Amino acid sequence: MSTERALLIQLVQKINEDRLVLPSLPEVAMNVRNLALEDECSLADLAKEISKDPALAVRLVALANSAAFGTSIKADSVTFAVSRLGLEKTRDLASAVAMHQLFYSEHKMTWEVLEQQWQSNIDVACCALALLACQHERGQLVHLTADTLLLACQIHNIGALPVLEQAERHPHLFQDKAQLLRMIQLMRAPLGKAVLEHWQFPRELIEVARYWSDMSFQTPAVSYLDLVRLSALYTRQWVLPDPLSSSLELFVRKGVIPDLEIFGMETYFLSFNEVRASFNVEAHV
């Protein structure tokens, strides 16, 4: 039996027996999600908790001010941003921004893969949020929100983390980065599902992690899953055997986008660039 096959069997067994070490949500994100569930929670409480992490706070304000969130009134503080977003939007946006804290390692090989996975998250998020901004401008897909979509983009490949954790614990079992990437591709779906169930995330987000690279699974209506898939394809983070234009037409027929000309809209470029810039802002403490 090959080492790679043995690793796959071991990971599957650990999932089935509930023995796999799964990552925890970053502390501030977990506290924000828990606070939002409390009846007596106020927006001021959320702002205070978020402000404990300056980098998270600054990026949250930058994202809230981006064109993807469709507002002309710019927030200049966490309190203002939270008051405008509300409890649920703040909860999901804080979780999305905090995900970066999980994509870190002091081991060279796993760090390179983590950085690659995180940059993929950003590319997919920029594209997806820009597409949703264009559709909202047309009065379409109003049942989908930018904050939850951003979170969906940031967790779509969360299944890579348990594989990378195994690579850090047992580096002698992983020959090179190529093998590690193959293991991630094979295991990201069941592991992503396991992680998000462990975090008690909603079904629609679990579906994203479980099925985003499985076109045989389709939601009845346009969903976050569709926008993540489309964005992964368009940014070439995911490649199908068919020509790109043919693959994209599938999303036109479902109604995810009106046509391929959406990628040339001014709103698309503005939103895309503002979301990307928000990931690069520095915290000033």
Image (cartoon, rainbow, N blue to C red):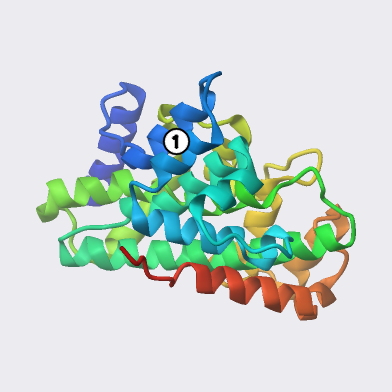
- Residue 146: x and y in percent read 66, 52
Q: Is residue 117 visible?
A: yes
Q: Is residue 156 visible?
A: no
> Neighbour class for label 1 at 10 Å: few (<14), some, many (≥20)?
many
Image height of 150 relative to 177, above or below = above
Residue 204 located left or right of residue 160:
right
| Amino acid at the residue labelled 1 | Val
Instruction: Name, please, the residue furthest toward the left.
Output: 172
Residue 96 located left or right of residue 68:
left
Q: Which residue is mark 1?
A: 32
Q: Total of numbered circles in the picture?
A: 1
Q: Secondary structure at mark 1?
A: helix
Residue found at x 70% / y 62%: 73
- Residue 211: x and y in percent read 58, 44
- Residue 240: x and y in percent read 61, 65
Quadrant for the C terminus in the image: bottom left
Residue found at x 60% / y 31%: 203
- Residue 215: x and y in percent read 66, 50
> Who is closer to the viewer here, 90 or 101?
90
Residue 158 located left or right of residue 23:
right
> Who is closer to the viewer here, 13 or 219?
219
Residue found at x 47% / y 44%: 95
Image height of 264 relative to 106, above or below = below
Image height of 65 relative to 206, above or below = below
Residue found at x 24% / y 64%: 111
User: Quarter-wise, where is residue 125 in the image?
Assistant: bottom right
User: Quarter-wise, where is residue 39 in the image?
Assistant: top right
Residue 159 located left or right of residue 19:
right
Quadrant for the N terminus in the image: top left
User: Quarter-wise, where is residue 199 in the image?
Assistant: top left
